[in-house]
Amino acid sequence: MNTVKSIADIKNRISEACQRSGRNSDDVQLIAVSKTLPVDVILEAYNSGLRIFGESRAQEVKEKTSDLPDDINWHFIGHLQTNKIKYVLPVCTLIHSVDSLHLAKAISDFCVKRDIPSSILLEINTSGEISKLGINSADAIEQYLEIRKLKNLNLKGLMTIAPYTNDENLIRQSFRLLKDIRDNLYKKIGSDQKLDLSMGMSQDYEIAIEEGSTMIRIGTAIFGPRGR
Ligand SMILES: *Cc1c(COP(=O)(O)O)cnc(C)c1O
């Protein structure tokens, strides 16, 4: 896999998708999902200009960050167990995958004790698949407003994973639902603070951009298939 070429290709596709949907390509952040990949491969992507990397395992992100440049923004995108908060919070600038009130409370407690803030997104289950984590889409607004009351949390938006299918309509529906939830939140709390929509992966990021995504999480399309 030629990382440099893949990144250039993805950037072109991002700007085409933005053009199609009348959006500005600066409004879409590319997060390179580097889970399972060794440090030298990550450095290659770093040297092609990428500065945001996504990891999904607490132990792994803790080990990798110390070996890579300081100006990388590490985002956590995997399921976070409360006992691993201590590894992830000090090194990650955004947690995409807060999937329960319980986890949000635990992060808030951790941050209050250390007098630090933490930026988070709420992961919403927009596909209805029981195998997927995330807050039930029907409860999303209520849970958001509840979590918003917790101390030391900057609630920055919503994240979702579309169903794994070739049916473009189902994928689109999932992204649309996340955007609808965001728009309903704007009606409740105002839209002074823009809320991010983290949606779109290697298979579906162009659809996600057409549906309003502001953060796409791309692994395979940059680095090739993961070994495990
Ligand atoms: C692994 C992962 C990705 C990247 O998936 P690709 O299909 O390799 O682009 C994105 N988001 C989450 C939450 C992931 O776990």
Image (spheres, rainbow, N blue to C red):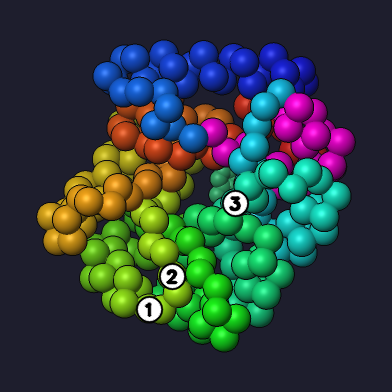
- Neighbour tally class for label 2: few under 14, some 14-19, many 20 plus, Cα within 10 Å: many
Total marks placed: 3
Residue 166 locus on image (x, y percent): 44, 29
Residue 104, compared with residue 221, is above or below; it is below
Foreground residue among 116 and 175: 116
- Quarter where residue 100 is shown: bottom left
- Quarter where residue 113 is shown: bottom right
Residue ID for mark 3? 75
Residue at horizontal 18 percent and vertical 61 percent from the top: 189
Amino acid type of disc 1?
Leu
Residue at horizontal 64 percent and vertical 50 percent from the top: 74
Can residue 106 be seen? no
Residue 66 locus on image (x, y percent): 82, 55
Left or right of 12, for residue 54: right
Amino acid type of disc 3?
His
Residue ID for mark 1? 150
Region of the chain picked out in magenta, as a range: 30-47
Residue 124 locus on image (x, y percent): 38, 57
Q: Are marks 1 and 2 in contact (CB under 8 Å)?
A: yes
Ligand 1 has an atom within 8 Å of the beta carbon of the residue at disc 2: no
Can residue 6 be seen? yes
Residue ID for mark 2? 153
Q: CA distance from mark 3 to mark 2?
A: 15 Å
Amino acid type of disc 2?
Leu
Foreground residue among 205 and 169: 205
Residue 42, compared with residue 182, is above or below; it is above
